[in-house]
Image (cartoon, rainbow, N blue to C red):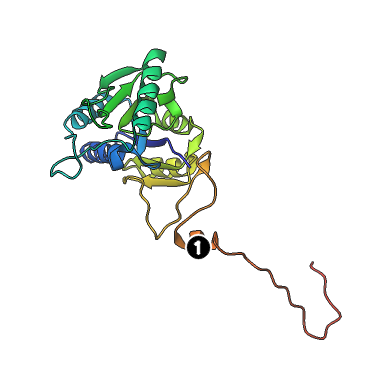
C-alpha cells in the first residue's frame, strides 16, 4: 500500500495554520509514511504567499540525529531509499521541474536528504503522481476547485487527502469528488483506531481499524431458518 496524498489549500483556509500543518504532514517520520502529504495543491489566488511561507518553513527545519533535542528531520531508513529519492528528483528536474529548495543529500555520512520543494512539475515526471518516500514536496497551482480535484485525482494512488477550506460547499465537493479512502478537512491525514483506515485504486483494498476494520478479520456466516416443522420456503 502506497500513497501520493494531496494536500489542498483554498483561499478561505487559515493560511498560517495550513502552512504549519503542511510542513508537519510532509516530514512525518522523515517523510517516510504512506499517509504523509506529498502533493500540495494550492489555489492560484494564494499560491505565491503559500509558496513563500512553505519554502521558508522547510528551509528552517533542523536536520540531524533525531535523538538530539530540537532536531525536526532525521535520516531516511536506508541508503537505497536515498538513492531512490535522488533518482525521482533528478528525473523530475530533467523533465522540467524546478527546485525551490533542497534537492540534494545533506552531509557526507548518514542517509540525510534535504527538505525539498519542487514546482513546475510536468505530468510525466515522477514527482507528479508517484510516491516520494522522503522529505520532497511537489507544489502545484490550481485555477479553481475543479482543477484542484483534477490534480488530486491525477495519480494511480488513492490513500488519503487533506483539504483546507472554510467553505462548506467546497468541503462537501472535495469529500465526494476526491478518489481516496480517507479525506480529512482542515486536518492532516492520520491513523486513528476509532475510524476505518485504508485506500482505493493502487493504495490497496479493505480497511483496518474501527468497526469496519474488525469485520475484515472475521468470516460472516449466513444462517437462514424457516419456521420449524414447515415444508420449506422460497426466497421471494
Q: Secondary structure at mark 1?
A: helix
Residue 126 rendering spot, x and y as whole percentages: 43, 24
Seen as rendered, the residue at the extreme right is 231
Q: How many numbered marks, from 0 up?
A: 1
**Residue at (48% x, 29% y) in the render:** 154
Q: From the image, which quarter does the C terminus lie in?
A: bottom right
Residue 41 rendering spot, x and y as whole percentages: 36, 30
Residue 96 seen anywhere in this rendered image of the structure: no
Asked whether, in this view, residue 222 is left or right of residue 166, the answer is right
Which residue occupies the foreground of this view, 30 or 182?
30
Location of residue 8 with respect to 211 vertically, above or below = above
Seen as rendered, the residue at the extreme left is 69
Residue 144 seen anywhere in this rendered image of the structure: yes
Residue that mark 1 sits on: 214
**Residue at (18% x, 36% y) in the render:** 64
Q: In the picture, residue 71 is in which quadrant?
A: top left
Asked whether, in this view, residue 148 is left or right of residue 13, the answer is right
**Residue at (45% x, 61% y) in the render:** 210
Residue 180 rendering spot, x and y as whole percentages: 47, 42
Residue 23 rendering spot, x and y as whole percentages: 25, 37
Asked whether, in this view, residue 96 is left or right of residue 224, the answer is left
Which residue occupies the foreground of this view, 219 or 68?
68
Which residue occupies the foreground of this view, 163 or 193?
193
Location of residue 186 with respect to 208 vertically, above or below = above
Seen as rendered, the residue at the extreme front is 109
Q: Residues within 10 Å of mark 1 (few under 14, many from 20)?
A: few
Amino acid at each position: 500500500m502506497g500513497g501520493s496524498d494531496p494536500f489542498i489549500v483554498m483561499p478561505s483556509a487559515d493560511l498560517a495554520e495550513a502552512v504549519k500543518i503542511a510542513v508537519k504532514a510532509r516530514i512525518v517520520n522523515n517523510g517516510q509514511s504512506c499517509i504523509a502529504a506529498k502533493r500540495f495543491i494550492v489555489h492560484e489566488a494564494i499560491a505565491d504567499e503559500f509558496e513563500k511561507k512553505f519554502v521558508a518553513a522547510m528551509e528552517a527545519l533542523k536536520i540531524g540525529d533525531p535523538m538530539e533535542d530540537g532536531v525536526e528531520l532525521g535520516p531516511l531508513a536506508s541508503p537505497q531509499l536515498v538513492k531512490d529519492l535522488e533518482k525521482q528528483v533528478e528525473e523530475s528536474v530533467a523533465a522540467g521541474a524546478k527546485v525551490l529548495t533542497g534537492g540534494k543529500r545533506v552531509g557526507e555520512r548518514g542517509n540525510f536528504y534535504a527538505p525539498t520543494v519542487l514546482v513546475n512539475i510536468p505530468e510525466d515526471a515522477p514527482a507528479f503522481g508517484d510516491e516520494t518516500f522522503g522529505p520532497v514536496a511537489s507544489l502545484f497551482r490550481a485555477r479553481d476547485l475543479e482543477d484542484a480535484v483534477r490534480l488530486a485525482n491525477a495519480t494511480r494512488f488513492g490513500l488519503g487527502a487533506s483539504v483546507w477550506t472554510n467553505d462548506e460547499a467546497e468541503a462537501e465537493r472535495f469529500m465526494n469528488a476526491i478518489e481516496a479512502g480517507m479525506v480529512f478537512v482542515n486536518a492532516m491525514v492520520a491513523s486513528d483506531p476509532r475510524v476505518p483506515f485504508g485506500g482505493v485504486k493502487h493504495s490497496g483494498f479493505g480497511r483496518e481499524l474501527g468497526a469496519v476494520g474488525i469485520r475484515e478479520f472475521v468470516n460472516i456466516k449466513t444462517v437462514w431458518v424457516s419456521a420449524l416443522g414447515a415444508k420449506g420456503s422460497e426466497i421471494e
